[in-house]
Image (spheres, helix red, strand yellow):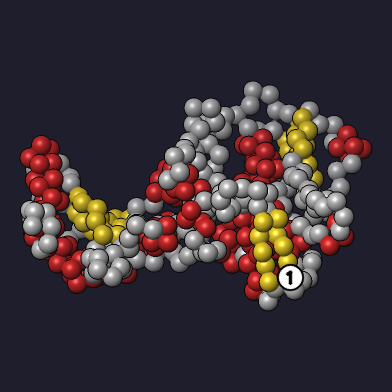
């Protein structure tokens, strides 16, 4: 029965009151827009038809200069992944809907929902679907996107892989870090722009996984001579394993971008090479960086360890699925869930045991949704 509930007029009243107050404060020459959900995709929520009417009323209010339209609902973790799609989900899933709002209102329209790259953003604007595009997570991955576009260095843009390490962390009270850019959120101690070294050195890196390639990239960007030894036939390490899952294939961009940067800075990478002591000494290095990663721990039973394999063995296909499988997950991250998903898909009966108080806490809420 109150002034802000029931009819659409009442439900829009609070928004309109706020917009009127803001406009009165900032004046007519200040650009003002409003972000809103034009379709909650939820029974009992704002539907598409009502969303179009809301859009029309916002335009005709004369209070704003543009619409910032999104789609979906955020009352559950699953709903949140529709508004903010994670890796493995469709890119720009609501762009066409935003374009419908733009066409219906003929009013400047802004949109953001997993617009992962400049090419998609350009298409969205050039096609006339929208007038402006938001790339929040992309700019967290690479805060210099605009500068690189201006300087014709688009091939150097570090791509967002949609891991949502940034958003899942803040929803749990943590800092907004980036799985692809360690400097994000740590700018005081780890600047995004790598400074040139005063003295050029010879650097040997052992291991071409994500850590080894990052060390090689930074050393190369600082102007050092860099050689990388990798025992495998290609780069990637555990990233290559986790990318076996279709929903995590975007993770390979972490490796591909670093490989391209290493090539740009003249880093020499030698595959199929075991870095023995004499191999390293032959390079006469000033600095040696060991980035060989870890080894799966499978010696977990007092007896019967011959039946134990690692999640890596399952994900890679080196171990054949059994009929009844117990997964002991003491890491709480993606590996156990990916192995469980693979095994269940092969017809095995799977049970997961963990010492944690919750299910895969390191995966975090939004990334946990597709597994469930």
| Residue at 24 percent of width and 68 percent of height | 44
Is residue 113 visible to the viewer in this orientation of the structure? no
| Residue at 63 percent of width and 67 percent of height | 341
Q: Is residue 172 above or below residue 305?
A: above
Q: Is residue 338 above or below residue 321?
A: above
Is residue 33 visible to the viewer in this orientation of the structure? yes
Residue 75 percent across, percent down from the top left: 34, 57
Left or right, residue 9 beside residue 349 = left
Give the number of marks.
Answer: 1
**Furthest residue toward right:** 278
Residue 216 percent across, percent down from the top left: 69, 40
| Residue at 65 percent of width and 52 percent of height | 354
**Element type where label 1 sits in the image:** strand
Other residues around mark 1 within 10 Å, as few (<14) / some (14–19) / many (≥20): few
Can you identify the residue that label 1 sits on?
Answer: 324
Left or right, residue 83 beside residue 13 = right
**Quadrant in which residue 320 is drawn:** bottom right
Question: Where, quadrant-wise, is the N terminus in this rendering?
Answer: bottom left
Q: Nearer the viewer, residue 37 or 309?
A: 309
Left or right, residue 262 beside residue 90 = right
Residue 228 percent across, percent down from the top left: 76, 43
Q: Nearer the viewer, residue 219 or 367?
A: 367
**Quadrant in which residue 51 is drawn:** bottom left
Residue 165 percent across, percent down from the top left: 51, 48
**Furthest residue toward top:** 198
| Residue at 19 percent of width and 72 percent of height | 49
């Amino acid at each position: 029965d109150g002034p802000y509930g029931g009819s659409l007029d009442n439900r829009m009243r609070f928004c309109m009151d706020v917009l009127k107050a803001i406009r009165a404060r900032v004046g007519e020459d200040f650009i003002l827009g409003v972000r809103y959900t034009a379709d909650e995709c939820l029974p009992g929520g704002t539907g598409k038809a009502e969303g179009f009417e809301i859009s029309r009323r916002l335009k005709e209010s004369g209070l704003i200069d543009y619409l910032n339209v999104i789609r979906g609902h955020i009352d559950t973790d699953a709903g949140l992944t529709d508004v903010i799609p994670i890796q493995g989900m469709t890119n720009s899933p609501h762009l066409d809907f935003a374009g419908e709002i733009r066409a219906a209102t003929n009013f400047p329209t802004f949109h953001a929902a997993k617009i992962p790259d400049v090419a998609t953003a350009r298409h969205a604007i050039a096609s006339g679907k929208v007038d402006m595009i938001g790339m929040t997570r992309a700019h967290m991955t690479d805060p210099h996107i605009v500068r690189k576009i201006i300087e014709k260095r688009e091939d150097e843009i570090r791509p967002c892989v949609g891991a949502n390490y940034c958003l899942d962390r803040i929803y749990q009270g943590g800092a907004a870090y980036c799985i692809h850019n360690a400097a994000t959120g740590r700018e005081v101690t780890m600047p995004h722009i790598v400074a040139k070294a005063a003295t050029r050195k010879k650097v040997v890196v052992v291991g071409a996984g994500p850590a080894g390639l990052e060390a090689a990239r930074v050393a190369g960007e600082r102007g050092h001579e860099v050689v990388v030894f990798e025992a495998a036939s290609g780069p990637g390490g555990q990233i290559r394993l986790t990318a076996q899952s279709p929903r995590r294939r975007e993770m390979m961009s972490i490796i591909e971008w670093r490989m391209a940067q290493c090539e740009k800075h003249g880093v020499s990478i030698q595959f199929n090479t075991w870095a023995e002591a004499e191999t390293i000494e032959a390079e006469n290095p000033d600095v040696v960086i060991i980035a060989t990663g870890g080894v799966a721990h499978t010696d977990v039973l007092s007896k019967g360890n011959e039946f134990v394999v690692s999640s890596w063995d399952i994900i890679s296909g080196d171990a054949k699925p059994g009929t009844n499988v117990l997964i002991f997950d003491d890491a709480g991250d993606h590996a156990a869930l990916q192995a469980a998903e693979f095994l269940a898909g092969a017809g095995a009966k799977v049970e997961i045991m963990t010492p944690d108080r919750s299910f895969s806490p390191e995966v975090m809420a939004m990334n946990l949704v597709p597994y469930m």
